[in-house]
Structures are given as C-alpha cells and as structure tokens.
Image (cartoon, grey):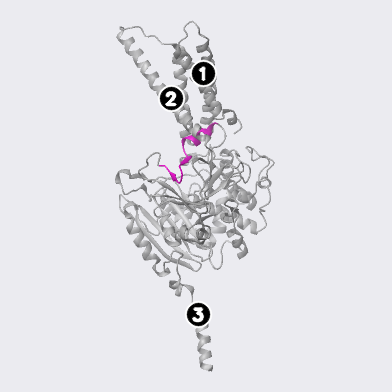
Amino acid sequence: MKKIVAGLVAVLLMVMIMPKNVYASERMTPSGISYKDIGAKIDAYTKEYEAGLVSVGTCVFDETGIICEGYYGYSDLEDEVPADKDTVYEWGSTSKLLVWVSVMQLKEQGKLDFETDIREYLPEGFLTKLQYEDETITMLNLMNHNAGFQESMYENQLAAEDELYGSLEEAVKACECYQAYHVGEHTAYSNWGTALAALIVERVSGMSYVDYVRQNIFKPLGMEHTSVGMHMEDNDWVRKQREELKCYLRYEQEEYNENYGVCHSWVQLYPAGSAIGTTKDLAKFAQGFVAEDCPFFECDETRDEMFDASSFYGDSNIAKNCHGLWTEQFQVQTLGHGGNTGGCTANLQLDPKSGLGIVVLTNEPGETMFCTGLVSLLFGNVTDSELVKNNPVTEQMDISGTYVPARTIARGFGSASRYAGGSFFLTESEIPDVFDMPLTGGIQMKHIGNRMWLQTSESGMSMFLYESADTDGNLQFEMMSTDYVQNNGSICGTVAYYAFVLFGVICIVVFVIKGLLFLIRKIRKRGRTVTTDKRITLQQAIQAVSGVILFCLISVIGPKGYTFAVFSCIMAVVLAAISFLNGIFLLWDKERAKLKQYVWAVFGFGYTAVIVWFQLYDFVHI
C-alpha cells in the first residue's frame, strides 16, 4: 500500500513541476484546434489564400511563451526577398497599446487618477476647443475614445518626414480638434485623444514619451528590434531594416495590384501609430499581457483592472473597451487592437481567460484576409459563442436609413466631409454595394442575436455591431471604435453635396467653353459678335470656383492644414457675398428680365444657403 501511495505522490509531483508547454499539445483553441496543430493550420490557411498574399509575420502565444511563429511571402516582391524574423512592419494604431500600458503603470504608482479631470495634468488653458467646458474629461474617457472629440482637421496623415513636429506637445497643440459631442455621448475613435494621453504620460513621468516606453516597456521585455520615435531616431537598426521593406496591394484579380515601394508612414501624432518592429518583438509585448508573471505591472491586480470593462455596448453588459484594449467578439471575447498605415496592417488579439493570443503583421494596407482571418481561425466565429446562443433574435426592427459615423468632422466648415464618405445606407438587412467596388465585394448585415449584428464582406472583414439608441433616441449601430448614428437628414446633405460639386464642375466646363469660343472668334476676327450676359457669366464663375474650393477642402484638408482651411473659408465667404449680391441684381434688372436670369438668381442665393448649411459660422470657433 505504501508503494502505491508513494507512486501516486511521485506522479502528482511530476505533473506539478512539469512545464506547461509539455502538455500544451493537449490544449485546444476556442475554435477546436489542438495547440500542436496550430502551426500546420496556419500554414494551410496561408497556402489557401496565397493568391492575395504579399507577406505575413505571425506568432501565437499563451501565458507560458511562444507556441509557434511563421513567416510567409516576400518583404520585397521584385527581388523575391522572403519575410523572416528580421522583417520589420509598421504597427499603426496597435501602437496605442503602448500608451495605455504606460497610463496603467502610472496609475498603479499613484501618479494618475482616473476620476481627475485631465486639465489638471496639462498646462493652464491648454485645451482651447472644448464645447462643453463644464463637463469633466478623465483619462478613462481618452482610453474609451468617448471624450467627445471629432476628427482632427489639422493632422496630416500623408505627411513627409520634414513635416513632423519638433515635440509631442507641439504636435498636440497644432492638431487640436473640436469637441463635438458631450463627454461619454459617443464612441469616436481619436488619434488626437491618444496623443493627448501620451503627453500627459510625459508630464506626469517627467520623461519624454519615447524614453518612458523604452525604459518601462521595451527594456523589461527585451524588445530590441522595435522603434517608437517619430523619426525612428531611437533605434538605428529598425530604421535601416525599414528601408528594406516594400509595401503592396495584392488581389486575386491582378489588374488591381499596386506597388507602393518603401511607403513610409510618418505620424505627426506619433504615439497613436508610429511603432515599427519585428513580429517577435510585437509578440513579446502581446505575451506580456497574459504572462504568468506580468512584466508590465508590480501587482497582478493592475492587469486584472486593465482587463475589466471600462465601457459597454449601449445599456448591455457586453464590454466594448477595457482600458484602451478593444473587445472583439469571436467564439470567445478577445481583447486587443488592430492597426493600419499607408503600407502595413497589424493585429494583436488575446483571450484573457485562456491566455491564448496571436499577432499578425503584413506589408499591405487595409489587409483583412490574414489579419482578421488568422484570428478567426484560432478564436472561432461569434455565431457559435455563448453570447449569441444565450441572446436569440426576438424581433427585427426596421433599420433602414442613413447612418453617419461619430468619427468624423461633425462641426465646422469641414463637416461637409461626412457627405463625401463614411456614411452608409441600410435597406432592410443589407448594405447595397453603391459604388460596385470590385475589390471588397458586397457588404452584408446579418442579425445574429438580440440587438446584435454581424457585418461581413467578401474581403474577409467581419465586424460585430450592437443596435442601440443615442441620447436623442436615434437608432445607432455601435462598433468597437465608433458609433454609426441614424440620421436620415443626411440623405439631403449627401445629395446636396454631390449636386453642388457636380454643378460646379458643369460650370467649369461651360466657363472654359465660353472662353475658348471667345478666343477663337477673336483670333479669327470674323464671325458673329460674342454676346454674353455678364451677370450670368459671373454666377457661373462663382459656382465653378466654389466647386473647386469645396472639392479641394474635403480632399486635401489634412495635407494643407490650417492655412488652407482658413483660406478656403475666407474665399467661400467672399464668393457667398458676391453670389448673394449678384442674385439681387439679376432679379432687379427688370428691363431685360428673362427666365434664365431668374434661374441664375436662384442659383446665386442657393450658393449662399449651401455655405450656411455647411456651418460656415462654426468654422470660426474651430
């Protein structure tokens, strides 16, 4: 009997001291893949979709370490340079997680408080564009992206390296955006809000943001192959390697393929998206969230707090954001963050319950087949989750209408941009493919549970949406990073915007033809005399110029920045005043009153009305 007991004790001790990776092969992913088969499954998936592959770096991990890593395709297609462990990729917005880990560290040290107004951490009068000055904005609001800020009109997302600012404080000041919503009213993803949080990290810690991250995150994790500086000045090896990476668009239909070359993405609000590094380094960072001995924090309770929900979908108990980590709904709920630049796509997702996680990096902008598909391969489909199974569809509301994103320029003259893109139209349960985009295919909306929807496309994109109502009672769809609010009045705005620009183009054509005919007749010095109604011609010129101004404002407001925006605004005011006066003169001229004069008078007054409609006055305040 004693021998039997001794044997049992020995076996028990062996199990207790046995490394987890020895029996990790017996563990299963939420989608039902044995851990020992994960690498083979990723190989097979990549082979299946290799027609659209440029390169992919991927690494799967759990709380004990790396389970498998793989590199596929080419970092340089022309020279057939294969992607490998030294290939660096831009993280894009996945970089924001460095900010939020920094914030949680300072909170743990008692240097930051989540109930304190952020203005107490900033210089006096630093925030100059708050619409609701009496409302408290906390660090949690910045982490949840619901502080009320609209998109920055002044951040140049196509900046060249010499257009970067000299410091983070200078960049945040220069790119400050207007507070368009009440605090907590809408989720509206904000690069500027994240950069503001990083500035607070600087001020509270007494260190530059770059130095803080390197000392408190990179160094403890041994991340020697990642840069976070705006110029990559903090890591010469990364800067050199980045010159070796080429970026592309690749599709099954070769006619749509594009070669972007090195395609640097210089980020003015750099904490929001400038990190660049190897797949292994990103995996080290990601694995830190679930490691048995968390390297980020002194106490595991801080990690537990970070994993707790800090915002929810509507009035449900479904977490939307966990202290800067977005939730995503698969067969299980994951935490993480994706990222996009002009040349790369990144995704980091982990399951805090099982400790399983994955990072995916590609040298293709807006990539979804691998950055989303490989995540789904491990974590399964939301339609198989307990969340959906326990909340069956009860009734389907009429969701048809026009939906406008909260993440937009909602106030000021630049608000016309929301009519140029971002809005979408729902008819019953389908989003029509209005522009017949051959690369993305049709986008579908499927009702999967009570107030829960799934938006999918043929490109591999899949997004969980939650049906709720905003503070005014308008129907809205909440995504993890922005709310889409029903606003059927935007149909009129959309039609007016495109009609206005189209009419401006027509006037340009008419104006050019008139000018050519005039020159031809002058050169030939024969033919009938050129007779034109000067007031009608003036109105055509106004419409032509204004159409160009509005188109340029919406198209290149970022690259041109504040100066161009002010110039456009002034020109619009001048043209509106001239147009209004010209309309009066067209109506006043009774001696030659003709129908076309009355028609052009209406256009003259209409131009002035359009400028007012696009909130010209509000521009003064932003």
Amino acid type, residue under disc 1 in the picture = Ser
Counting from the top left corner in percent of width and height, residue 602 is at 50, 18
Amino acid type, residue under disc 2 in the picture = Phe
Residue 548 found in image quarter: top left
Stretch in magenta: 413-432
Is the Cβ of the residue at disc 1 closer than 8 Å to that at disc 3? no
Question: Which one is nearer the viewer's eye here, 505 or 196?
Answer: 505
Can you tell which mark lies on residue 15? 3
Asked if 339 appears above or below 555 in the picture, the reply is: below
Give the class, few, some or many, for how many residues have Cα within 10 Å of label 2's Cα (few <14, many ≥20): some
Q: Secondary structure at mark 2?
A: helix
Q: Secondary structure at mark 3?
A: helix
- Dot placed on the residue nearer the N-terminal end, 1 or 2: 2
Question: Magenta stretch: residue 296 in it?
Answer: no
Furthest toward the front, the residue is 395
Q: Secondary structure at mark 1?
A: helix
Furthest toward the top, the residue is 591
Residue mark closest to the camera, 3 vs 2? 2
Residue at 33% from the left image edge and 45% from the top image edge: 257
User: Do we see residue 223 in this rendering?
Assistant: no
